[in-house]
Image (cartoon, rainbow, N blue to C red):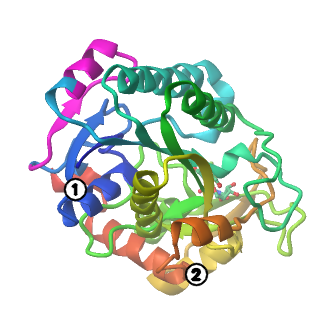
Amino acid sequence: MTILVTGGAGYIGSHAVLTLKRQKKDVVIIDSLQTGHRGALDQDIPYYEGDLRDSEFLDHVFSAHKIDAVIHFAANSLVGESVTDPLKYYDNNVGGATSLLQAMNRHDVKKIVFSSTAATYGEPETDLIDENDPTIPTNPYGETKLAIEKMLKWAGGAYGLHSISLRYFNVAGADLDGEKGEDHNPETHLIPIVLQVALGQREKISVFGNDYPTPDGTCIRDYIHVQDLVDAHLLALEKLDKDPQTAVYNLGNGQGFSVMEVIEAARKVTGHDIPAAIEKRRAGDPAKLVASSARATKELGWKPNYPELERIIQTAWDWHRAHPEGYASTK
Ligand code: UFG
């Protein structure tokens, strides 16, 4: 069984490739290196550099390998950037997915696991979000992911394509053996930025708003370890083998932590002060996003193994300390 991983040089994609490799699965990677890192690639795994919107490129890859299933990570994923440049998101995310599904059709590949997001829910009205809650995205990033979920549903009916969309909450942490980690340029995510402060690479962490309707006024998120997230993708592939379908699952721990709680946990893990300064709200941030993952537990048999926030931060800290410049440290 050969699995095509798009975005395999990115944060989550590279962790997925590593897990598939450890399980002795055959993997092929596509990445444009728009945001992925050459240093995150594995020499032993076939890799094709190119853009999903290029159908000739995709035909070349699908002809060179007998692909059984696709895990589709490749996308632009910054909420703020999507607000200022929505067409980039529609073009790359929706355009890339459309072209990928067309290539799958041409080459008779019927299974795909898709990287979706909690940003599809917008500003939820419930404490624990489940998959039946309304999807009203508050930014173009979430809109493009929701559009792809819908495309997968229609493609399922029309072409017999089977898909599982996984709605990630806040993915964090690094490989437990320290082989891969999180490296974005520019970095915008809370945990890696807080760790950059601990490493002395930044002076302080800016807390974006403390006037939200939460106990300490800062935004609450549900942080999930990248390995737990990756494990769910493998279960989703197994599910598609046994029980062809179109489905959507949340992936989170069901527990929310405020920005201030994350900073406090990072102070404990790192032993550094991590100065924090309250600043203005960041556009498009919902006050609270916490998942019910009951459906994934029941139907995929998924259970997070690393739900503790300090453990998640510890794995990220270990990687950041070993790679203070990210993948550039390993060049
Ligand atoms: N935050 C700060 N200061 C920073 C960075 C972040 O206060 O320097 C705050 C944000 O305002 C937010 C929280 O920390 O309240 C988490 O922010 P992240 O940027 O780490 O993550 P987001 O919740 O914005 O988004 C992430 C992914 C999205 C995904 C979403 C789903 O980046 O792709 O989780 O919950 F859609």
Q: Which residue is mark 2?
A: 265
SS type, badge 2: helix
- Residue 35 is one of the magenta-drawn residues: no
Residue at x 59% of width, y 60% of height: 170
The quadrant where ligand 1 appears is bottom right
Please state which amino acid type lies under the numbered disc 1. Answer: Ser
The total of numbered circles placed on residues is 2
Q: Start and end of the magenta stretch?
A: 44-62
Give the mark, 1 or 2, whose residue is nearer the N terminus.
Answer: 2
Height in image: 233 above or below 58?
below
The answer to whether residue 177 of the structure is visible from this angle is yes
Q: Which residue is mark 1?
A: 329
- Residue at image point 55% right, 25% down: 94
- Locate residue 176, reporting x and y percent: 32, 75
Vertically, is 183 above or below 235? above
Residue 279 picture location, percent across and down: 75, 55
Query: Magenta includes 53?
Result: yes
